[in-house]
Amino acid sequence: MAEEDDAFLSLSDPDSEDSIPMFFDKNSHICYLEMMLELLPSPYQSQEINRLTLAYFAVCGLDILRSLDRVDKEGVIKWVLSLQAHPLDEAELSKGQFYGFHGSRSSQFRPNDNGDAMPNGSHLASTYCALSVLKTLGYDLSLLDSTSIVESMKNLQQRDGSFMPIHSGAETDLRFVYCAAAISFMLENWIGIDKEKAKEYIINCQSYDGGFGLTPGSESHGGATFCAVASLRLMGFIEDDILSKNVSSCFINVPLLLDWSLQRQAASDGGFQGRLNKATDTCYAFWVGGVLKILGAHKFINYEGLRKFLFTCQSQYGGFGKTPGQLPDLYHAYYGYCAFSMLEEPGLGSICTELGIPNGVHPGL
């Protein structure tokens, strides 16, 4: 019994190097995502309004794990489609509202018996997640009422090229420029975004150190930098593997961007940090690693160091925590799977880095 207790302590002590399993525990990860897909754990109840985003992490994660057969595809597709907002008529599209997808039932109001318009809480990020889930499950996006999505998305773009996520009272930054670009790309319809204005906004967000802030003049950040680079790639403004091209003619400072991105990998533990002087974090293995992948610079990543760091964040219950020893959460679990996919972990499906979803047929990339 004493030997068994010692073995348990060794496995559960996050500070012991011998306790860290240096292998990708695929079965545990599948069980973790299945559990998350079936019910909403109590820590997530305050995020019920983002239920569609949580479903995106679970469904797309299972596809990366090559276990999409665990998903009730027809049931999930029907649920996602039921969350789309629809205008009463074509004239409604020019009245300032956005007709995308709601994040959950709690932000969706049904029309009353008189047919009066109800408050519309559809959101750009929820729409990105909805399309990602539908695409992953094999739904034909041409069957959607995509015209109302892209036509009304025009209402969200601001004069400086940025986007609001909803039709009023929200912040504007690179996250929503990325959502607009990804939505347009997946629907193969760009009438909802002025690409030149969006490009100018992105350029203005590049900082003196080479990274991108969420807004012009703000501190460089790993997530914002991914949104900037991926948006430019989706919109066709930068080529694949740009480092092999003439970067001196590019409208963004690519050498400085590369230098900033590579400096985000810590020599101490091999993980990536999102900002200077911040702790390494599982999700930035994708956000910053994805930037390097798009630039064609992933060969400069210390793969061995990154894998070791990610293993220290892998939970014995499945999923990944933010940092070593923390309990798993869906957000960090999903981007942990994306990171391992980019690292070409055996048994995992590939991802489309620019869209942040499992790989499929993506014309133009």
Image (cartoon, helix red, strand yellow):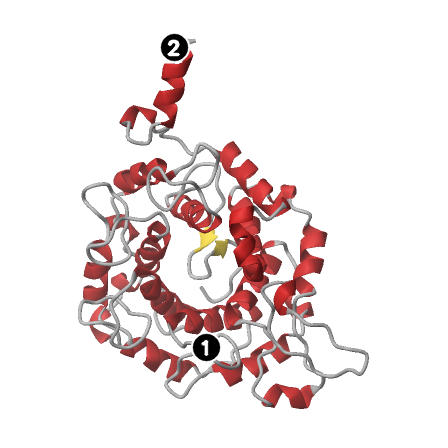
Q: For residue 278, what is the image quadrant?
A: bottom left
Instruction: Name the amino acid type tagged 1.
Output: Ala
Q: Mark 2: which secondary structure?
A: helix
- Name which residue lies at 48% across and 48% down: 330
Asked if one can make out residue 132 in the rendered structure from this viewpoint, the answer is: no
Out of 35 and 350, give the one closest to the viewer: 35
Instruction: Name the amino acid type tagged 2.
Output: Glu
Which quarter of the rendered picture does the N terminus lie within? top left
Q: Position of residue 228 (x, y in %)?
A: 35, 69
Asked if one can make out residue 260 in the rendered structure from this viewpoint, the answer is: yes
- Name which residue lies at 54% across and 62% down: 129
Up-down: is 33 above or below 177? above
Q: Residues within 10 Å of mark 1 (few under 14, many from 20)?
A: few
- Name which residue lies at 74% across and 76% down: 111
Q: Position of residue 179 (x, y in %)?
A: 47, 69
Q: Which mark is residue 129?
A: none
Q: Position of residue 116 (x, y in %)?
A: 74, 84
Q: Which residue is mark 1?
A: 170
Residue furthest to the right:
113
Q: Position of residue 186 (x, y in %)?
A: 54, 67
Question: Position of 168 compared to 228: left or right?
Answer: right
Q: Residues within 10 Å of mark 2 (few under 14, many from 20)?
A: few
Q: Mark 1: which secondary structure?
A: loop
Out of 35 and 223, give the one closest to the viewer: 35
Up-down: is 328 above or below 223? above
Q: Which residue is mark 2?
A: 3
Find the distance from the CA under tag 2 to the CA under tag 1: 57 Å
Out of 39 and 249, give the one closest to the viewer: 39
